[in-house]
Image (cartoon, rainbow, N blue to C red):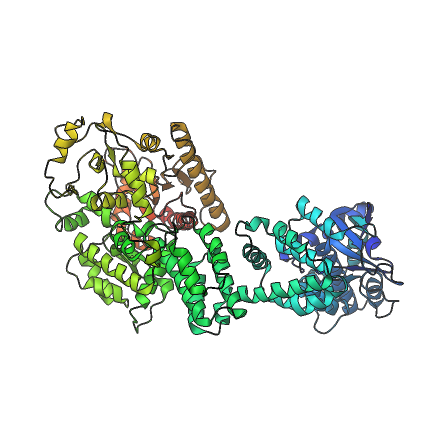
Amino acid sequence: MVKATETNLAGVLEGKKQYQVPLYQRTYSWGKKQLDQLWNDIVELAETRRTDPGATHFIGSLVLAASPDFSVVGVSKLLVVDGQQRLTTLTLLLAALRDHLNKTGDRERAEGVYAQYLVNVYDKGKPTKILPTQADREAYLAVVHSAPEAGGSDAVGEAYNHFRSKISAADDPDDPHDLEEIENAVVRGLAIVVVTAEAGDNAHRIFESLNNTGLQLNQSDLLKNYLFMRLGEKADVVYESVWLPLEKKLDGENLELLFWLDLVQTDERAKQSDTYVGQQKRLERLKSVDEIEAEVLRVAKLGDVLATILEPAREDDGEIRRRLGRIKAWGSTTAYPVVMRLLDRRASSTATVEEVARALTYLESYFVRRIVIGRATASLNRTLLQAVGAISGDDPVDVALRDFLSRGRKYYATDQQVRDAASTVPFYWQGRAAQKKLILQWIEESYGSKEAVDPANLTIEHVLPQTLTQAVRETFATGLPDGADVTYEHERVVHTLGNLTLSGYNSELSNKGFHSKRTMLAESGLRMNQEIAAHDTWGTAEIAARGAALAAKIIDLWPGPDETVVGSVADEPSAIRAVVASIVAEIPAGRWTSYGEVALVAGTYPQPVAGLLGSYSMANAWRVLQTGGTISPGFRWHEPSRTDDPKAHLESEGLNFDDAGHASPEQFIDATELASLTGLDVDQAGWRTSDASSESGRTNNLKAQQLEFFGRVRDLGRATGTVVKYWPKPQPQHWLDISIGTGRAHLSLTVSSRTPTAGCELYIVNDKQLFTELYAKRAEIEAAVGSRLDWLELPTRKASRIIVRGNGDFRDADQAPQLAEWLVTTAERFAAIFPAYL
């Protein structure tokens, strides 16, 4: 049975009482914001009570339960199930008031505060009224007992010092009653509802109930509570010797991760959100205190393993330390269950150091090769959780892990698949930006360069620029056959592995042609850039050759699967190739589609689709044309004996062309119809949905994605921006307009669902003279912005635009945070620079 009583702080603290904060409670965590709010409320209440002595201020509830030694003669002891932060804070304030009174000579009142509210002065040992959890106890007791070390740098000490400062500032020498009024407001004016569970009630269940109704402790708090409530008299000893050292290694978030990683060792389906429920079911089978103690010891040992994963410097073996460092840098906890199992097996002497090092190498290789072939995240979580069981048997862990990853569709790319992907897959858009950069960085490290280059200053650079300016177009076209589609060829190779490098001069290099870039690349401390600079030209042939060379490096650095298990490459084609082939096979005679529409249905990009159709024989591949309905100049039949004109063949199938060689738009199949024919679902943005036939459904999905992304931009701008004064509510559209305090121009942030880019622009509403004035100061403005800008006068329109573009897909969960940050940062820079010119 539970009973509730309304009282004040005096009613809680006066008398022979002690409130014990259980081990499972969080350590004291109030900061300056909460302390200031409480102090301001108290000062306001003290002012009010001068004219209205009965005024009160409600500060919440205090939930108590019987302590195990409640019936001991002397001080009545109760467990604080909820409210320990407020209760601890208020007694720290009273201790600060006592010490200020002592310092200013009012020792009698100081002694009264000490005896009534802080300590049970007439009991043996003078036990404190509040007994915090072990982690806070030493600092708290130092404050209450006025020890020399009181007021340290911990949270308890900082709260005490904060109140000492506030009380000193509030003490008016000309007002003898001001501090008395504050004391009275604290102990008599703060209203508290005390909820007390009777002896025999389950405090753990009360704790759980509070969590369900708003306390919202994390799952490690709940599990800590469950374990220590069941430890009984052993709780203090186990906490001091085992749990407290664990908490010093891992914070609350990582403790929760630890419990989940432990759970998935035996249940691969366990979600991290279900950690508490899953662990509790397992722990309920433990009956004795000794079994619970053994469980805490086991978890603490696993905590050492996780601490090593999170801090690889703790690892003694050099090779394992290097591999752990790379896995941490990779930035995905997806790998942790496997890594934990590997290190745990080494700790239990069922795996050697060498075996674990090789297994970690296979794991790293698995991640790298998946990104290279464009399958960065496909089924990754499930695969790695299942791998935990695969390495738990008697086989050597390295052999077992490689064998498991090699079998079935786990996308552990073979050497041939790596070679193929280097020339077809847009590496720039695969996986997370940081992961792609790491792969290039690790390749560079393999050269053994003596000159140190700080990776923090490097970004991924396109050697052939992403933007096909007229100058770049002319240079690039010189290396192509007569009649080749320059735009198509550029799109086909620009994002592939062979065209990418690392540079600390991304903004300076930007859209410059190759001849302008060669000098910077030659002077770079990176070997890969020096090799690029050795070329006289940079076109499709050079990109293909470098892609092949980098593929060979990847194959050498990162061992592939066991191909005796995988089978030959011909027997198991890449997954994306199989999907494209199945889509293209459904195009009816007399109809046509584009590379982009096939890519939307396949969940990829036009470049790899074009590369696959050009490299492999697929039914109906000739019915896939360039945007606009023209046949690619590079089209070739895969059958060596075929020399017929593809246009004539398409016309024989019933497809109509105009005089300029464009296929009829009426015979075009868009992604929605193509998806319906294939039995797949697709939306306008290229992401699969549940309704392929609904045009409104497709549009609504894209609008929802735009709304969600610009909501992220707005929240980030409000949280971090300092120049932009107002971040407006976003609408379901591809732009967000921002005022900069003038009607002549505003900022417009944009995203594209057709190409993975975003833009920040100064949109000049109707003022060509302003555009001319700004353009005259182009060099000065670009230097201030730190980037080249696109200056679009738009002579046939009233508006003009000055734009900087960034790369990233706003629909991709991995890229969206980085892209939002770029937009906010760029908008802030524009807002700081352009108003001075307006």
Which of 824 and 443 lies nearest the eye of the viewer? Answer: 443
Residue closest to the eye, 254 or 63: 254
Give residue 170's position: percent from left, percent from top.
72, 59
Q: Is residue 489 something one can see in this rendering?
A: yes
Q: 496 and 392: which one is in front?
A: 392
Asked if residue 814 lies left or right of residue 19, the reply is left
Q: Position of residue 142 (x, y in %)?
A: 73, 70
Q: Is residue 544 above or below residue 155?
A: above
Q: Is residue 811 above or below residue 33?
A: above
Estimate the x, y position of residue 613 in percent, counting from the top left.
Answer: 23, 42
User: Which sits in the foreground, 352 or 457?
Assistant: 352
* Residue 800 visible, this angle: no
Q: Quadrant of residue 648?
A: top left
Q: Image check: 615 left or right of 258?
A: left
Quarter holding the N terminus is top right
Q: Quadrant for the C terminus, please.
A: top left
Instruction: Residue 254: give x, y in percent of width and height.
Output: 56, 59
Q: Residue at x 86, y 70 (%)?
A: 124
- Residue located 25% across and 63% down the image: 529
